[in-house]
């Protein structure tokens, strides 16, 4: 029978692996879950269960693994709160997607987001035209923020037509 300490170490290893894998493969999956993303997350959790608890499938083994996850999550939240560089590494930084009604195509490509997904996020925020968007940002948590209230108040400024710009 494996010791509970070994279960905690296995759980920590799996937790850190999953965090790094999600960070490497993109953050939009978390905030913009599709059916395939949800199935993926469910299957990942099932596939790593045995790696965490090993042959100990007892209630105590499961609770030990869960307790290890809660403890590690608490520690990582504390560390990311205190260290900007670790927070940036684990969570990433916000990325501008639209500025003054112009889609920043290279930023969309960098985060692997389609224009259709961006337009869907705009509609969710009640904005029906890209020209009305002052600023759209993919936040570090994977949500897309859309700011458009100030656009109509700047009447002295001419509105630009909808276009995609590639900045390099």
Image: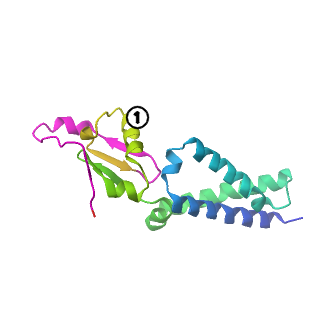
Towards the viewer: 17 or 113: 113
Q: Name the residue at 12% across, 41% down.
A: 158
Mark 1 surroundings: few (<14), some (14-19) or many (≥20) residues within 10 A: few
Q: Name the residue at 52% across, 63% down.
A: 24
Tell me if residue 65 comes above or below residue 127 in the rendering: below
Q: Name the residue at 53% across, 63% down.
A: 79
Q: Name the residue at 85% across, 54% down.
A: 57
Give residue 21's quadrant in the image. Answer: bottom right
Towards the viewer: 165 or 76: 165
Towards the viewer: 42 or 92: 42
Tell me if residue 29 comes above or below residue 35 in the rendering: below
Q: Is residue 36 magenta?
A: no
113 lies left or right of 64: left
The image shows residue 38 at horizontal and vertical percentages of 61, 44
The part of the chain drawn in magenta is: 139-167
The residue singled out by tag 1 in the image is 124
């Amino acid at each position: 029978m494996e010791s509970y300490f070994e279960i905690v170490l296995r759980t920590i290893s799996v937790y850190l692996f999953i965090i790094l894998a999600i960070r490497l493969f993109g953050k939009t999956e978390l905030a913009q879950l599709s059916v395939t993303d949800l199935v993926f997350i469910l299957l990942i959790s099932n596939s790593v269960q045995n790696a965490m608890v090993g042959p100990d499938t007892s209630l105590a083994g499961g609770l030990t693994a869960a307790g290890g996850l809660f403890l590690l999550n608490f520690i990582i939240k504390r560390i990311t709160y205190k260290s900007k560089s670790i927070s940036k590494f684990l969570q990433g930084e916000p990325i501008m997607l639209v500025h003054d009604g112009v889609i920043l195509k290279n930023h969309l490509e960098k985060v692997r987001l389609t224009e259709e997904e961006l337009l869907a996020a705009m509609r969710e925020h009640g904005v029906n035209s890209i020209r009305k968007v002052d600023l759209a940002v993919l936040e570090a948590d994977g949500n897309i923020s859309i700011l458009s209230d100030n656009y109509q108040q700047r009447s002295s400024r001419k509105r630009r037509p909808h276009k995609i710009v590639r900045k390099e």
